Amino acid sequence: PLTLPATAQGRIFGGDHGQSSDSDLYRFDAKAGDQWIFETNASRSGSPLDTKIEILTADGQPVPRLLLRCIRDSELEFRGISGDSRGARLKNWEEIFVNDYFYIGGEIVKQFRQRRGPDAENDFYPDTGARFCFWDTTPRAHAVGEPAYQVLPYPVGTQLPGNGLPVFTVNFENDDESQRKLGKDSRLTFVAPADGAYLVRIADVRNFSGDNFKYDLVARRPQPDFKVTLTGANPTVSAGSGKQFSVKAERLDNFAGPIRIDITGLPPGFQASTPIVILPGLFEAHGIINCLSDAAAPTEANWGLTKVTATATIAGKEVTHDVNNLGTVKKADKPKVIVHLENIEAPVQPGTLATGFPKPPEITIEPGGSITCKLRVERNGFNDRIAFDVPNLPHGIIVDDIGLSGILIPEGQTERTVFLRAEPWVPEQSRTFFAIAQVEGNQGSCPMVI
Protein backbone atom coordinates (compact mmCIF):
# COMPACT_ATOMS: atom_id res chain seq x y z
CA PRO A 1 0.00 0.00 0.00
CA LEU A 2 0.99 3.62 -0.69
CA THR A 3 -0.39 6.76 0.90
CA LEU A 4 0.03 9.42 -1.77
CA PRO A 5 2.15 11.45 -2.31
CA ALA A 6 4.91 8.91 -1.84
CA THR A 7 8.25 7.59 -3.04
CA ALA A 8 8.94 3.87 -3.21
CA GLN A 9 11.98 1.80 -4.13
CA GLY A 10 11.80 -1.54 -5.83
CA ARG A 11 13.56 -4.16 -7.93
CA ILE A 12 12.35 -6.28 -10.83
CA PHE A 13 13.93 -9.62 -10.02
CA GLY A 14 13.14 -13.28 -10.66
CA GLY A 15 13.09 -16.05 -13.23
CA ASP A 16 15.88 -17.77 -15.11
CA HIS A 17 18.47 -16.25 -17.46
CA GLY A 18 17.39 -12.70 -16.71
CA GLN A 19 13.89 -13.10 -18.12
CA SER A 20 10.74 -13.07 -16.04
CA SER A 21 7.18 -11.87 -15.80
CA ASP A 22 8.01 -10.19 -12.48
CA SER A 23 6.21 -6.94 -11.70
CA ASP A 24 5.66 -4.82 -8.61
CA LEU A 25 2.22 -3.56 -7.61
CA TYR A 26 1.36 -0.72 -5.25
CA ARG A 27 -2.17 -0.08 -3.98
CA PHE A 28 -3.48 3.46 -3.45
CA ASP A 29 -6.83 5.18 -2.90
CA ALA A 30 -8.13 8.07 -4.99
CA LYS A 31 -11.24 10.22 -5.29
CA ALA A 32 -12.95 10.87 -8.64
CA GLY A 33 -11.08 13.65 -10.44
CA ASP A 34 -7.90 13.30 -8.36
CA GLN A 35 -4.78 13.97 -10.44
CA TRP A 36 -1.50 12.22 -9.74
CA ILE A 37 1.76 11.98 -11.65
CA PHE A 38 3.63 8.68 -11.41
CA GLU A 39 7.21 8.54 -12.68
CA THR A 40 10.16 6.19 -12.43
CA ASN A 41 13.85 6.82 -12.04
CA ALA A 42 15.77 3.77 -13.23
CA SER A 43 17.83 4.18 -16.41
CA ARG A 44 18.74 7.75 -15.42
CA SER A 45 20.44 6.25 -12.36
CA GLY A 46 22.26 3.54 -14.29
CA SER A 47 19.76 0.72 -13.84
CA PRO A 48 19.32 -1.59 -16.87
CA LEU A 49 15.57 -1.60 -16.19
CA ASP A 50 13.35 -0.21 -18.97
CA THR A 51 10.23 0.58 -16.97
CA LYS A 52 6.58 0.52 -17.91
CA ILE A 53 3.88 2.05 -15.69
CA GLU A 54 0.25 0.89 -15.74
CA ILE A 55 -2.73 1.88 -13.62
CA LEU A 56 -5.10 -1.01 -12.85
CA THR A 57 -8.36 -1.40 -11.02
CA ALA A 58 -8.33 -3.10 -7.62
CA ASP A 59 -8.98 -6.45 -9.31
CA GLY A 60 -6.14 -6.00 -11.80
CA GLN A 61 -7.92 -4.71 -14.93
CA PRO A 62 -6.54 -1.84 -17.07
CA VAL A 63 -8.16 1.55 -16.42
CA PRO A 64 -9.36 3.06 -19.73
CA ARG A 65 -8.45 6.70 -20.36
CA LEU A 66 -10.28 7.60 -23.58
CA LEU A 67 -11.67 6.20 -26.82
CA LEU A 68 -10.22 6.99 -30.23
CA ARG A 69 -12.67 6.81 -33.12
CA CYS A 70 -10.97 6.32 -36.47
CA ILE A 71 -12.46 8.57 -39.17
CA ARG A 72 -9.93 8.09 -41.99
CA ASP A 73 -7.37 5.41 -42.79
CA SER A 74 -3.86 5.92 -44.06
CA GLU A 75 -0.49 4.20 -43.91
CA LEU A 76 3.22 4.97 -43.83
CA GLU A 77 4.59 5.18 -47.34
CA PHE A 78 8.05 5.48 -48.93
CA ARG A 79 9.95 4.46 -45.78
CA GLY A 80 9.54 3.56 -42.13
CA ILE A 81 10.32 5.91 -39.26
CA SER A 82 12.28 5.65 -36.03
CA GLY A 83 11.11 6.72 -32.61
CA ASP A 84 13.13 9.93 -33.04
CA SER A 85 11.71 10.99 -36.40
CA ARG A 86 10.10 14.42 -36.71
CA GLY A 87 7.40 13.24 -39.11
CA ALA A 88 6.36 10.64 -41.65
CA ARG A 89 5.01 10.34 -45.15
CA LEU A 90 1.35 9.43 -44.74
CA LYS A 91 -0.78 8.13 -47.58
CA ASN A 92 -3.78 10.25 -48.61
CA TRP A 93 -1.90 13.29 -47.33
CA GLU A 94 -4.11 15.67 -49.30
CA GLU A 95 -6.93 14.88 -46.82
CA ILE A 96 -4.84 15.48 -43.67
CA PHE A 97 -4.82 18.90 -42.01
CA VAL A 98 -3.02 20.80 -39.27
CA ASN A 99 -3.95 19.65 -35.73
CA ASP A 100 -5.36 16.29 -36.88
CA TYR A 101 -4.59 13.42 -34.47
CA PHE A 102 -3.18 10.15 -35.80
CA TYR A 103 -2.94 6.72 -34.19
CA ILE A 104 0.09 4.77 -35.46
CA GLY A 105 0.79 1.42 -33.86
CA GLY A 106 0.00 2.43 -30.29
CA GLU A 107 1.24 6.02 -30.34
CA ILE A 108 -0.86 9.15 -30.83
CA VAL A 109 0.66 12.09 -32.71
CA LYS A 110 -0.73 15.43 -33.86
CA GLN A 111 0.06 17.06 -37.18
CA PHE A 112 1.92 20.35 -36.85
CA ARG A 113 2.57 21.09 -40.53
CA GLN A 114 0.89 19.67 -43.59
CA ARG A 115 2.81 17.69 -46.14
CA ARG A 116 3.64 20.12 -48.96
CA GLY A 117 3.82 17.68 -51.81
CA PRO A 118 4.69 14.06 -52.61
CA ASP A 119 8.37 14.46 -51.64
CA ALA A 120 7.71 16.06 -48.24
CA GLU A 121 6.64 14.70 -44.84
CA ASN A 122 3.76 15.28 -42.47
CA ASP A 123 5.48 17.03 -39.54
CA PHE A 124 4.16 16.21 -36.08
CA TYR A 125 4.14 18.25 -32.86
CA PRO A 126 6.06 19.96 -31.38
CA ASP A 127 7.29 22.87 -33.51
CA THR A 128 10.93 21.71 -33.32
CA GLY A 129 12.85 18.51 -32.62
CA ALA A 130 11.66 14.91 -32.53
CA ARG A 131 7.94 14.20 -32.33
CA PHE A 132 6.02 14.06 -29.07
CA CYS A 133 3.12 11.76 -28.32
CA PHE A 134 -0.20 12.55 -26.64
CA TRP A 135 -2.07 10.95 -23.71
CA ASP A 136 1.19 9.43 -22.44
CA THR A 137 1.66 7.14 -25.42
CA THR A 138 5.26 6.42 -26.44
CA PRO A 139 7.11 7.16 -29.72
CA ARG A 140 8.09 3.94 -31.49
CA ALA A 141 9.68 2.72 -34.72
CA HIS A 142 7.24 1.90 -37.51
CA ALA A 143 7.70 0.03 -40.78
CA VAL A 144 6.71 1.23 -44.22
CA GLY A 145 3.16 0.13 -45.00
CA GLU A 146 2.09 0.13 -41.34
CA PRO A 147 -1.54 1.30 -40.92
CA ALA A 148 -2.23 4.78 -39.59
CA TYR A 149 -5.60 6.28 -38.69
CA GLN A 150 -6.86 9.79 -38.26
CA VAL A 151 -8.72 9.74 -34.94
CA LEU A 152 -11.04 11.80 -32.76
CA PRO A 153 -10.91 11.42 -28.94
CA TYR A 154 -14.08 10.63 -26.96
CA PRO A 155 -14.77 10.03 -23.26
CA VAL A 156 -14.88 6.43 -22.06
CA GLY A 157 -18.40 5.07 -22.32
CA THR A 158 -19.40 7.10 -25.39
CA GLN A 159 -21.55 5.09 -27.81
CA LEU A 160 -19.88 5.37 -31.21
CA PRO A 161 -21.86 4.13 -34.24
CA GLY A 162 -19.84 1.86 -36.50
CA ASN A 163 -18.24 3.38 -39.58
CA GLY A 164 -16.18 0.42 -40.79
CA LEU A 165 -13.00 1.61 -39.04
CA PRO A 166 -11.62 0.56 -35.63
CA VAL A 167 -12.23 2.19 -32.24
CA PHE A 168 -9.14 2.10 -30.03
CA THR A 169 -9.18 2.23 -26.23
CA VAL A 170 -6.25 4.10 -24.67
CA ASN A 171 -5.46 2.97 -21.12
CA PHE A 172 -3.57 4.74 -18.36
CA GLU A 173 -0.10 3.40 -19.14
CA ASN A 174 3.29 4.62 -20.31
CA ASP A 175 6.54 3.03 -21.48
CA ASP A 176 9.01 5.83 -22.25
CA GLU A 177 7.92 9.34 -21.22
CA SER A 178 6.06 10.83 -24.19
CA GLN A 179 8.07 14.07 -24.45
CA ARG A 180 11.48 12.37 -24.26
CA LYS A 181 12.61 14.13 -21.11
CA LEU A 182 13.32 10.97 -19.09
CA GLY A 183 15.05 8.67 -21.58
CA LYS A 184 13.81 5.11 -21.00
CA ASP A 185 12.10 6.06 -17.74
CA SER A 186 8.33 6.43 -17.54
CA ARG A 187 5.90 9.17 -16.58
CA LEU A 188 2.12 8.93 -16.42
CA THR A 189 -0.58 11.46 -15.51
CA PHE A 190 -3.52 9.70 -13.87
CA VAL A 191 -6.97 11.24 -13.40
CA ALA A 192 -9.12 8.97 -11.25
CA PRO A 193 -12.40 8.18 -13.03
CA ALA A 194 -14.18 7.19 -9.78
CA ASP A 195 -13.66 6.87 -6.04
CA GLY A 196 -11.88 3.69 -5.09
CA ALA A 197 -8.68 1.69 -4.78
CA TYR A 198 -6.26 1.39 -7.69
CA LEU A 199 -3.00 -0.40 -8.42
CA VAL A 200 0.09 1.03 -10.08
CA ARG A 201 2.16 -1.71 -11.71
CA ILE A 202 5.88 -1.40 -12.53
CA ALA A 203 7.55 -3.89 -14.87
CA ASP A 204 10.28 -4.14 -17.47
CA VAL A 205 8.74 -3.58 -20.90
CA ARG A 206 10.93 -6.41 -22.32
CA ASN A 207 10.16 -8.76 -19.39
CA PHE A 208 13.83 -8.65 -18.37
CA SER A 209 14.86 -8.76 -14.74
CA GLY A 210 17.91 -9.00 -12.52
CA ASP A 211 19.43 -8.24 -9.17
CA ASN A 212 20.42 -4.73 -10.31
CA PHE A 213 17.10 -3.88 -12.03
CA LYS A 214 16.32 -1.24 -9.42
CA TYR A 215 14.03 1.78 -9.63
CA ASP A 216 12.46 4.62 -7.67
CA LEU A 217 8.74 5.27 -8.08
CA VAL A 218 7.54 8.81 -7.34
CA ALA A 219 3.85 9.64 -6.96
CA ARG A 220 3.11 13.37 -6.66
CA ARG A 221 0.58 16.06 -7.44
CA PRO A 222 1.04 17.93 -10.74
CA GLN A 223 2.91 21.21 -10.35
CA PRO A 224 2.40 22.98 -13.70
CA ASP A 225 5.11 25.52 -14.48
CA PHE A 226 7.48 26.57 -17.25
CA LYS A 227 11.04 27.64 -18.00
CA VAL A 228 12.09 29.83 -20.93
CA THR A 229 15.54 29.97 -22.52
CA LEU A 230 16.69 32.60 -25.02
CA THR A 231 19.02 31.50 -27.82
CA GLY A 232 20.90 33.82 -30.14
CA ALA A 233 22.39 35.99 -27.38
CA ASN A 234 25.45 38.18 -27.99
CA PRO A 235 24.54 38.94 -31.60
CA THR A 236 26.22 41.33 -33.98
CA VAL A 237 23.57 43.54 -35.57
CA SER A 238 24.36 45.40 -38.78
CA ALA A 239 23.45 49.08 -39.12
CA GLY A 240 19.96 49.49 -40.54
CA SER A 241 19.28 45.76 -40.26
CA GLY A 242 18.21 43.10 -37.76
CA LYS A 243 19.26 39.79 -36.24
CA GLN A 244 16.95 36.95 -35.22
CA PHE A 245 16.81 35.30 -31.79
CA SER A 246 14.54 32.60 -30.34
CA VAL A 247 12.84 31.81 -27.05
CA LYS A 248 12.11 28.20 -26.17
CA ALA A 249 9.84 26.93 -23.40
CA GLU A 250 10.14 23.85 -21.27
CA ARG A 251 6.60 23.06 -20.17
CA LEU A 252 6.32 21.25 -16.84
CA ASP A 253 3.55 18.91 -15.69
CA ASN A 254 1.21 19.41 -18.65
CA PHE A 255 1.15 23.22 -18.58
CA ALA A 256 0.01 24.21 -22.08
CA GLY A 257 -1.03 27.88 -21.80
CA PRO A 258 0.44 30.90 -23.64
CA ILE A 259 3.72 32.38 -22.37
CA ARG A 260 4.51 36.08 -22.90
CA ILE A 261 8.15 37.22 -23.12
CA ASP A 262 8.86 40.92 -22.46
CA ILE A 263 12.13 42.70 -23.26
CA THR A 264 12.90 46.06 -21.65
CA GLY A 265 15.84 48.43 -21.23
CA LEU A 266 17.43 48.30 -24.68
CA PRO A 267 20.05 50.98 -25.41
CA PRO A 268 19.26 53.95 -27.71
CA GLY A 269 19.12 53.09 -31.40
CA PHE A 270 18.09 49.45 -30.84
CA GLN A 271 14.70 47.75 -30.63
CA ALA A 272 13.54 44.18 -30.10
CA SER A 273 10.17 42.74 -31.04
CA THR A 274 8.26 42.59 -27.77
CA PRO A 275 6.15 41.10 -26.38
CA ILE A 276 6.79 37.71 -27.97
CA VAL A 277 4.18 35.03 -27.29
CA ILE A 278 4.83 31.30 -27.23
CA LEU A 279 1.41 30.10 -28.33
CA PRO A 280 -0.67 27.59 -26.32
CA GLY A 281 0.65 24.06 -26.72
CA LEU A 282 3.77 25.21 -28.60
CA PHE A 283 7.34 25.43 -27.40
CA GLU A 284 9.15 28.12 -29.37
CA ALA A 285 8.79 31.63 -30.76
CA HIS A 286 11.12 34.04 -32.54
CA GLY A 287 12.06 37.67 -32.22
CA ILE A 288 14.20 40.22 -34.04
CA ILE A 289 16.57 42.86 -32.70
CA ASN A 290 17.05 45.86 -35.00
CA CYS A 291 19.60 48.63 -35.15
CA LEU A 292 19.18 52.13 -36.61
CA SER A 293 21.72 53.12 -39.27
CA ASP A 294 22.99 56.01 -37.12
CA ALA A 295 22.82 54.26 -33.74
CA ALA A 296 25.76 54.78 -31.44
CA ALA A 297 27.83 51.69 -30.77
CA PRO A 298 26.42 50.19 -27.54
CA THR A 299 28.52 49.45 -24.50
CA GLU A 300 28.49 46.53 -22.13
CA ALA A 301 26.97 48.83 -19.53
CA ASN A 302 24.10 49.65 -21.91
CA TRP A 303 23.21 46.02 -22.35
CA GLY A 304 23.46 45.36 -18.64
CA LEU A 305 20.19 47.31 -18.27
CA THR A 306 18.28 45.00 -20.61
CA LYS A 307 15.90 42.57 -18.94
CA VAL A 308 13.99 39.58 -20.37
CA THR A 309 11.08 38.07 -18.44
CA ALA A 310 8.50 35.36 -19.18
CA THR A 311 4.96 35.49 -17.80
CA ALA A 312 2.04 33.07 -17.90
CA THR A 313 -1.19 32.45 -16.02
CA ILE A 314 -1.31 29.11 -14.16
CA ALA A 315 -4.45 28.11 -12.27
CA GLY A 316 -5.62 31.73 -12.32
CA LYS A 317 -2.36 33.11 -10.92
CA GLU A 318 0.16 35.14 -12.89
CA VAL A 319 3.63 33.59 -12.74
CA THR A 320 6.78 35.39 -13.93
CA HIS A 321 10.28 33.95 -14.40
CA ASP A 322 13.50 35.66 -15.45
CA VAL A 323 15.00 34.62 -18.79
CA ASN A 324 18.67 34.70 -19.70
CA ASN A 325 19.56 38.06 -21.26
CA LEU A 326 20.46 39.10 -24.80
CA GLY A 327 24.04 39.43 -23.62
CA THR A 328 26.37 41.94 -25.25
CA VAL A 329 25.11 43.13 -28.63
CA LYS A 330 27.60 44.58 -31.07
CA LYS A 331 26.96 46.93 -33.98
CA ALA A 332 28.41 46.15 -37.41
CA ASP A 333 28.67 48.22 -40.59
CA LYS A 334 25.87 48.51 -43.12
CA PRO A 335 25.34 45.11 -44.79
CA LYS A 336 25.17 44.34 -48.50
CA VAL A 337 21.50 43.36 -48.13
CA ILE A 338 18.84 45.24 -46.14
CA VAL A 339 15.41 43.62 -45.90
CA HIS A 340 11.99 45.29 -45.62
CA LEU A 341 8.49 43.85 -45.10
CA GLU A 342 5.77 46.27 -46.17
CA ASN A 343 2.02 46.61 -46.41
CA ILE A 344 1.41 46.97 -50.14
CA GLU A 345 -1.38 49.50 -49.56
CA ALA A 346 0.32 51.60 -46.83
CA PRO A 347 4.00 52.53 -47.30
CA VAL A 348 6.13 52.70 -44.15
CA GLN A 349 6.59 56.16 -42.63
CA PRO A 350 10.15 56.34 -41.28
CA GLY A 351 10.92 57.47 -37.77
CA THR A 352 7.34 57.48 -36.52
CA LEU A 353 8.13 56.14 -33.03
CA ALA A 354 10.01 57.87 -30.21
CA THR A 355 12.78 55.29 -30.60
CA GLY A 356 13.46 56.51 -34.14
CA PHE A 357 12.09 53.33 -35.71
CA PRO A 358 9.05 53.28 -37.99
CA LYS A 359 5.75 52.07 -36.60
CA PRO A 360 5.46 48.39 -37.58
CA PRO A 361 3.24 48.01 -40.65
CA GLU A 362 0.06 45.99 -40.11
CA ILE A 363 -1.96 43.59 -42.25
CA THR A 364 -5.22 41.85 -41.37
CA ILE A 365 -6.20 38.35 -42.41
CA GLU A 366 -9.46 36.50 -41.83
CA PRO A 367 -9.52 32.84 -40.74
CA GLY A 368 -9.64 30.74 -43.88
CA GLY A 369 -8.54 33.70 -46.00
CA SER A 370 -5.42 35.05 -47.69
CA ILE A 371 -3.54 38.35 -47.69
CA THR A 372 -0.46 39.75 -49.41
CA CYS A 373 2.46 41.88 -48.31
CA LYS A 374 5.60 43.08 -50.04
CA LEU A 375 9.13 41.83 -49.48
CA ARG A 376 11.74 44.38 -50.59
CA VAL A 377 15.53 44.49 -50.42
CA GLU A 378 18.17 47.16 -50.74
CA ARG A 379 21.14 45.74 -52.64
CA ASN A 380 24.46 47.29 -51.68
CA GLY A 381 26.77 45.41 -54.01
CA PHE A 382 25.04 42.02 -53.63
CA ASN A 383 23.43 40.97 -56.92
CA ASP A 384 22.83 37.22 -56.49
CA ARG A 385 19.44 35.68 -55.80
CA ILE A 386 18.21 35.79 -52.20
CA ALA A 387 16.25 33.10 -50.36
CA PHE A 388 14.15 34.04 -47.33
CA ASP A 389 12.52 32.65 -44.21
CA VAL A 390 9.48 34.31 -42.60
CA PRO A 391 9.64 33.34 -38.89
CA ASN A 392 7.09 33.76 -36.10
CA LEU A 393 3.86 33.71 -38.09
CA PRO A 394 0.90 32.52 -35.99
CA HIS A 395 0.48 28.77 -36.00
CA GLY A 396 -1.88 27.97 -38.84
CA ILE A 397 -0.75 30.83 -41.08
CA ILE A 398 1.77 29.92 -43.79
CA VAL A 399 3.54 31.52 -46.70
CA ASP A 400 1.62 30.14 -49.65
CA ASP A 401 2.47 29.58 -53.33
CA ILE A 402 6.22 29.32 -52.83
CA GLY A 403 6.94 26.24 -54.96
CA LEU A 404 9.91 23.95 -54.45
CA SER A 405 12.44 26.80 -54.35
CA GLY A 406 10.87 28.60 -51.38
CA ILE A 407 10.68 32.38 -51.03
CA LEU A 408 13.11 33.91 -53.54
CA ILE A 409 14.03 37.27 -55.03
CA PRO A 410 15.98 36.46 -58.23
CA GLU A 411 19.23 38.03 -59.34
CA GLY A 412 18.94 41.71 -60.14
CA GLN A 413 15.43 42.10 -58.69
CA THR A 414 14.57 43.95 -55.48
CA GLU A 415 11.04 42.96 -54.48
CA ARG A 416 8.32 40.32 -54.61
CA THR A 417 4.80 39.77 -53.31
CA VAL A 418 4.38 37.35 -50.41
CA PHE A 419 1.09 35.45 -50.09
CA LEU A 420 -0.09 34.44 -46.61
CA ARG A 421 -2.89 31.94 -46.00
CA ALA A 422 -4.72 31.22 -42.73
CA GLU A 423 -6.41 28.00 -41.67
CA PRO A 424 -10.10 28.41 -40.71
CA TRP A 425 -9.42 27.64 -37.03
CA VAL A 426 -6.72 30.29 -36.38
CA PRO A 427 -7.91 32.33 -33.34
CA GLU A 428 -8.08 36.11 -33.16
CA GLN A 429 -4.70 37.57 -32.22
CA SER A 430 -2.00 40.10 -33.11
CA ARG A 431 1.51 38.83 -33.68
CA THR A 432 4.79 40.20 -34.98
CA PHE A 433 6.71 38.42 -37.71
CA PHE A 434 9.64 39.34 -39.94
CA ALA A 435 11.73 38.21 -42.90
CA ILE A 436 15.26 36.81 -42.81
CA ALA A 437 17.52 36.81 -45.89
CA GLN A 438 19.60 33.63 -46.00
CA VAL A 439 22.68 35.48 -47.27
CA GLU A 440 25.22 37.95 -45.92
CA GLY A 441 24.89 36.90 -42.28
CA ASN A 442 21.12 36.32 -42.31
CA GLN A 443 19.96 39.92 -42.28
CA GLY A 444 16.48 40.55 -40.87
CA SER A 445 13.72 43.07 -41.51
CA CYS A 446 11.96 45.24 -38.95
CA PRO A 447 8.89 43.46 -37.55
CA MET A 448 5.47 43.50 -39.16
CA VAL A 449 2.16 42.88 -37.34
CA ILE A 450 -0.48 40.46 -38.55
Image (cartoon, rainbow, N blue to C red):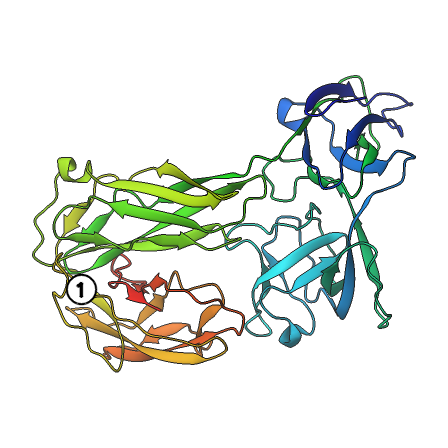
Q: Nearer the viewer, residue 390 or 171?
A: 171
- Report the front residue among 123 and 350: 350
- Determine whether, in the image, residue 399 is placed left or right of residue 328: right
Return the residue nearer the eye: 91 or 132: 132
Which of the image's four quarters has the C terminus?
bottom left
**Residue 23 in the figure: left or right of residue 416:** right
Quadrant in the rendering for residue 354: bottom left
x 81%, y 57%: residue? 168
Residue 12 x/y as whole percent: 81, 23
Q: Residues within 10 Å of mark 1 (few under 14, many from 20)?
A: some
Residue located 67% across and 28% down the image: 43
Task: Give the amino acid at mark 1.
Answer: Lys
Instruction: Answer left or right for 391 relative to 396.
Output: left
Q: How many marks?
A: 1
Residue 407 visible? The answer is yes
The residue most toward the bottom is 345
Q: Which residue is at a point 51% across and 73% down the rendered structure image?
A: 423
Q: Which residue is mark 1?
A: 336
* Image vertical order of residue 198 relative to residue 124, above or below: above
Residue 367: image location, x then y, percent: 48, 75
Q: Secondary structure at mark 1?
A: loop
Task: Give residue 7's position: percent from left, percent from top.
Answer: 69, 21
Q: Quadrant of residue 172?
A: top right
Question: Residue 395 in the image: x percent, y percent?
Answer: 48, 63
